[in-house]
Amino acid sequence: MRWVVASSDPAVLLRIAGEGGEVVGLASQPLLVISLALEKEAQCCLIDSRCGDRSVIEAAAKALHTGLPGVKVFVWDVSGQWPEEAAAQDGITLWRPPAPVAAAEPPKANSGAAEPPSVMPPQVITVFSPKGGVGKSFIAANLAALLALRAGMRTAVVDLDLDCGDQSVCFNLPDGPTITDLLPGLKSVRGDPPELPRHRPSGAHVLLAPHHPELAEFVEPGDIERLISALARNFQLVVIDTAPGLDNEVTYKALELSNAALLVVNLCPSSLKAARTFLGLRSRLGLTDLRLEILANRVTGNSAVSPTQGQSFLGQRFLAQIREDPAAGEALIAGDPVTRRSPESPAAEDLVNLARRLFPQLPLKARQEGPAWRRWARRIWR
């Protein structure tokens, strides 16, 4: 549906995106909607109640119904005081902002001794998003590296973005073995736990995506099941990085086999719309019993959508928010997780918060500041 809108509220754009609509024109006042709707061949028009007096908005709605009888008219009723009966008589559909969702509270501190990592059963965490470019690979790599460094866990990252995987960049392992190299062993009767290359600075083990995208077609969902089963016998934590999209059988197989999943979003309408589409499909995919957490990545003070609006739109609180941070980009270029390279950075601190909320029973060691000369160098270059 093609929409003309008289509003600057990001929540309006999110609502329209969630309804599958496309905004083709923005008007500054109600009466300008009429000519713009005619010019853009709009099918729906929305007027923010804050854009003018009620009488002006009603006049604009009447003109739209007279001149463009097929156009649907909506009013974004922020105050919630527009009479529904009067709106119905004028052919107006009322939309109201969703109730705000409170920010997620941090877990309460455990008064007893924290459970050691060796006691916790093996965990499989899948990091995914229907939308590409949101930072899935960054989250997966840093979560595994962080828990290897500061929780002493034996961790593995599996890159299941089989066409364009990025874990080789995140860990600077361009020549490591890939999942296709392991296929013959996975198809064997025993299915012994595979040996994976280790990123020595962080301690995380990494299984890369195929070096050539045409090899991706040789990886089947059954191979993923055998791989994850084998890795869970050899590692305390398996973090799975996945390909974007809603039609990937390999990703869905990983989700089925996971203890929990992290849905990564950015605070922009397109990313949030794609996430809500997935949430609407969750029951049909048989994933209602899966622990599903939502993570907002690259959060800034001037994001197109506020965290509260994003949570309201999705109907679920964010488990954590990772701030936009130049240190993250620098770490990616260096091929070294930011949780190891710059543990004092805002992004690294937010990732620690994420790990604590995912696994509140795990004790995390204090960050290592590094040698004195490095701390002085950081202060100078800042």
Image (cartoon, grey):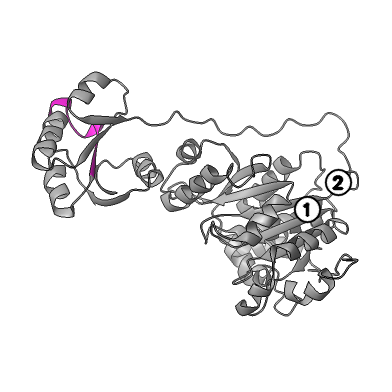
> How far is disc 2 from disc 1 in space, using C-alphas?
15 Å
x, y percent for residue 246: 54, 56
Give the structural element (helix, strand or loop) at label 1. helix
Is residue 98 in the magenta section? no
Q: Residue 334, located in which quarter of the rendered image?
A: bottom right
Q: Residue 287, located in which quarter of the rendered image?
A: top right
x, y percent for residue 10: 36, 43
x, y percent for residue 357: 70, 40
Residue 382 visible: no
Q: Residue at x 18, y 54 (%)?
A: 40
Region rendered in magenta: 44-55
* Looking at the image, residue 178 lies above or below residue 130: below
At label 1, the amino acid type is Leu
How many residues crowd around disc 1 within 10 Å: few (fewer than 14), some, or many (20 or more)?
many
- Comparing 235 with 362, the one in front is 235
N-term mark: 2 or 1: 2
Q: Residue at x 70, y 78 (%)?
A: 174
- Comparing 72 with 211, the one in front is 72
